[in-house]
Image (cartoon, rainbow, N blue to C red):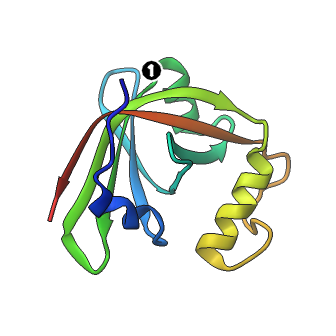
Amino acid sequence: MSATIPDAYLDLLKKNIFASFVTLMADGSPQVTPVWIDFDGTYFVVNSALGRMKDRNIRRDPRVALSLSDPENPYRYLEVRGRVVEITQDGADEHVNAMAKKYLGQDVYPFRQPGEERVIYRIEADRISTMG
């Protein structure tokens, strides 16, 4: 069953803040990356490129965590523990462009590398913690 985000914290998902995205290495140690974050009303959505460390980690172990701190009050945060329930390339290019618009004000994601293939991870929250 999916955890619910308290209404008082939904604003964090509309701000241009980075989430710390934690995946698990093969030895069980955490690997963390700052990522752009999206929320579709049900799932947290992260966009990345195929073959990156987080991609390999998620395909081996779908358990992940996210932490979002309010830039106006770093003691106010949203922590998510959950699992990736969908991995897809469908719509990933359009999604990264939408995220570039949100975070950079640009219509097209400007950091694409030659041959890069984008991928979307949909994360279901099993537990949500908040403070502040």
Furthest residue to the right?
115
Residue at the spot 58% in from the left edge and 33% down from the top edge: 55
Q: Nearer the viewer, residue 2 or 50?
A: 2
Q: Callout 1: 10 Å neighbours few (<14), some, many (20+)? A: some
Determine which residue is flagged by label 1: 61
State how many labels appear.
1
Q: How far across and down, in percent of the image, does residue 35 sit?
A: 50, 56
Q: Is residue 27 above or below residue 70?
A: above
Residue at the spot 38% in from the left edge and 60% down from the top edge: 10
Q: How far across and down, in percent of the image, does residue 88 sit?
A: 70, 31
Q: Nearer the viewer, residue 4 or 30?
A: 4
Residue 91 occupies quadrant: top right
Specify the amino acid type for callout 1. Answer: Asp
Apparent side of residue 49 relative to residue 86 in the rendered image (left or right): right
Q: Nearer the viewer, residue 127 or 113?
A: 127
Q: How far across and down, in percent of the image, does residue 93 sit?
A: 79, 50
Q: Is residue 1 above or below residue 23?
A: above
Residue at the spot 63% in from the left edge and 29% down from the top edge: 87
Q: How far across and down, in percent of the image, does residue 5 sit?
A: 33, 48
Apparent side of residue 102 relative to residue 90 in the rendered image (left or right): left
Quadrant that contains the C terminus: bottom left
Q: Nearer the viewer, residue 52 or 12?
A: 12
Apparent side of residue 96 relative to residue 25 in the rendered image (left or right): right
Residue 50 occupies quadrant: top right
Furthest residue to the front?
7
Residue at the spot 70% in from the left edge and 56% down from the top edge: 96
Q: Is residue 3 above or below residue 44?
A: above
Quadrant that contains the N terminus: top left
Q: Secondary structure at mark 1?
A: loop
